[in-house]
Image (cartoon, coloured by chain):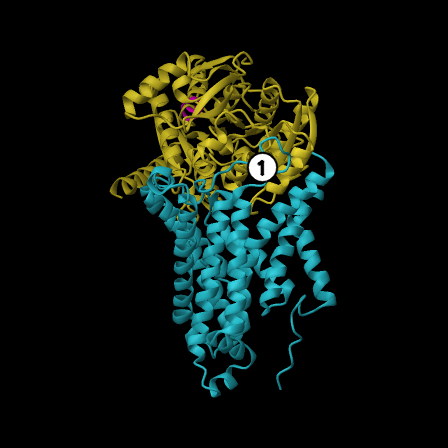
Amino acid sequence: MTATEVFLQQVIYGLSNGMIIALVALGYTMVYGIVELINFAHGDVFTLGGFLALTIVGALGAAAVLNPDTLGDSSHWLLLATLVIGAGLFCGGLNVLIDRVVYKPLRSAPKLTQLVAAIGVSFILVNIALFWGGAPMKILGNGNAAAASKNFPEILEGSNLLGEESNVVLRLEDLAIFAVTIPLMIGLTLFVKHTRLGRGMRATAQNPIAAKLMGIDTDRVISATFLIGGFLAGAASVMWSVYNNSISFQMGFRAGMDAFTAAVLGGIGSLPGAMIGGVLIGLIRSLSDGYIETRWTNVVVFGVLILILVFRPSGLLGLKQREKV
Amino acid sequence: MISTLTSTLANFALLCTLTVSAHAADTIKIVSSLPRTGSANAQTTSMVNGIKMAIAELGAKIGESTLVYEDWDDASPQKGNWDPTVEAQNADKAIADAEVMAYIGTYNSGAAKISMPKLNAAGLVMVSPANTAPNLTKTGFGEPNEPAVYRPSGKINYFRVVPTDDVQGAVAADYAKELGATKVFVLNDREVYGMGVAAVFEKRAKEIGLTVVGTDGIDYKAANFKSLVTKMKQAGADLVYFGGTTQTNAGQIAKDIVSGGLKAKLIVPDGCYEKAFIESAGAKALEGRCFITFGGVEAKALKGKGAEFYANYKKTYGGEPEGYAVYGYESAKVVLSAMQKLHAAGTAITRAGVLAEVSKTKGFTGALGTWSFDENGDTTNRVMSVNTVVAGEFATVKVSGLDAGQ
């Protein structure tokens, strides 16, 4: 491989991984923007999305669904769309449920209480994933070693789009990530900018009390935020599973950590910030893996984060928080 | 419950009579300390069955003395795994019981670190059916004070019948060469076991003329290793060795090698010799390109006395033995053989006598072939199998070290 080819390849991987991180980061940043809560359970909601996707695939029988005779050549994309929407709605619903049951009663409690509650929820979800990976998965033939990572069947055809002889590998999976994440991001931006509910969100983020006085149903806005954040996490988890061909009960830990870092890097509370942050983290990871050493990658990622925060304490696109008096 | 209670009472009664009579010729006790609580239980049951078979073959008698075997658990429900507290208690209990002449265990190398110094000071022989960490017996693999720290008396009382990881890494390197590899890339998971076995692989690979084109310690919690695969591709690697386990993401590495278009074979150690590895990687990513080394051979491939063991085991217990069953059997056999020799010589069976006889074990013909204990207490048995995956199941492709015995 020539140096250019290697660079190109690492950029492809970096962007693909980064887009997934960005999608998860949006959930963190939106929730923080509205209720000022770092939702540590977000990564584990993401995990359960992957488990749901594998369960759907197992229940449908991937081989049968992907048979061109039953659904035609578009069956791959149809299955992918089903999974994205299914896992998205599931994760969105779960996120709203968690908010209603755990966070809402604590809304006026000190911030630290909410944070600890979020960590608690995270533990509960990880254990649900462990349980889900045992007996329930076995029924569908996905193996019952709960703690081991599980194989996720190849949903998109895996051949190299640049030809089998090419040194640079670009697969349908890479393109699918862009095909799913970019429209979602554009949709989200338009939604927040131009709809009534979106305006409500921006208002609540700026000043919840004033928003309430203006007649905005802030509870509804908060629920919508958790729903959308969860939906994006669900969509991201499907893309993650399809891209890596595996799921594991711990997958949300690293994904969540990267996404949270991305949200902070981009400026927490800022939507474009989370997107840029995610892509940046993906690129830094892949270039560090390729040009430095895998063992140093975490050091590089957090080194860059510290450096950026030193010069821009509120992140790349974050607004300077006005001190509340 | 009642049976454990009565046996505890019986032990107590025996202990009382012993302290009075101080003569231990009538009952000889062998104990094992293996994990009974948690996921290793199936493996332990199999090893215990092996020990019981060895004792039953002698009619539970050495001369006039009765052999008594006790199966102790070194795990706790709190941990669901071996527990240092329980292992320490087991060692103390064995030392305090004057009838105990041999201690079979442990399963986990970490547990051995707890009981080894205690039993060593007491001069009680310990035989492990399953510990593979080389630093328990050899210098240059772990901390500078290892293994001396496990031998406070300065003598060796710890023996094992299973080949260690330094053998395993070397066998993997030799097999890499056999596969026609010339440029190898060595990865590890940055855990004690994985780094150890990868270091041996790397050393051996260099000795036999393979070029090590790169090494790296992976971050096993990463989502994927695609960028690393690109780096290995750039380095021109035609074989990848990963010192790690299913739990440290060996399956993902196997998959990313395929999806990243790296045309290289993959070799992994026995930490991946479990069904869960095939489940996580997917058979497609492994078939024809991944090889797994394992200390010993699968039970049904054993020869000679091993084949007899396999047939008897199936007859007695009605199921396939787990991988380590034969090692449990062999551990008991070597201890019993020492006792028989003492008896034949007309010597009293004492802890010191049994220890001396076990350490003299040379050219022992058992279920694992003919082997000896070396100066460190390790088996000279070097039997290793290389396995691959065929139609979703492990299949042995090569067995090495059959001629290395003695």
Q: Viewer-proximal residue, A273 or B353?
A: A273
Q: Is residue A291 above or below residue B44?
A: below
Q: Which residue is mark 1?
A: B260
Q: Is residue A293 visible?
A: no
| Amino acid at circle 1 | Gly
Q: Is residue A75 left or right of residue A243?
A: left
- Is residue A3 on the magenta stretch? no
Figure quadrant of residue B98 = top left
Residue at image position (55%, 41%) is A171
Q: Is residue B19 above or below residue A199?
A: above
- Is residue B328 on the magenta stretch? yes
Q: Main secondary structure of the magenta part?
A: helix
Q: Is residue B333 visible?
A: yes
Q: Report the span colored magenta.
A: B327-332
What is the tally of numbered marks visible in this picture?
Answer: 1
Image colour for chain B is: yellow
Q: Position of residue A233 (x, y in %)?
A: 48, 58
Q: Position of residue B239 (x, y in %)?
A: 61, 27
Q: Chain of mark 1?
A: B
Figure quadrant of residue B393 = top left
Image colour for chain A is: cyan
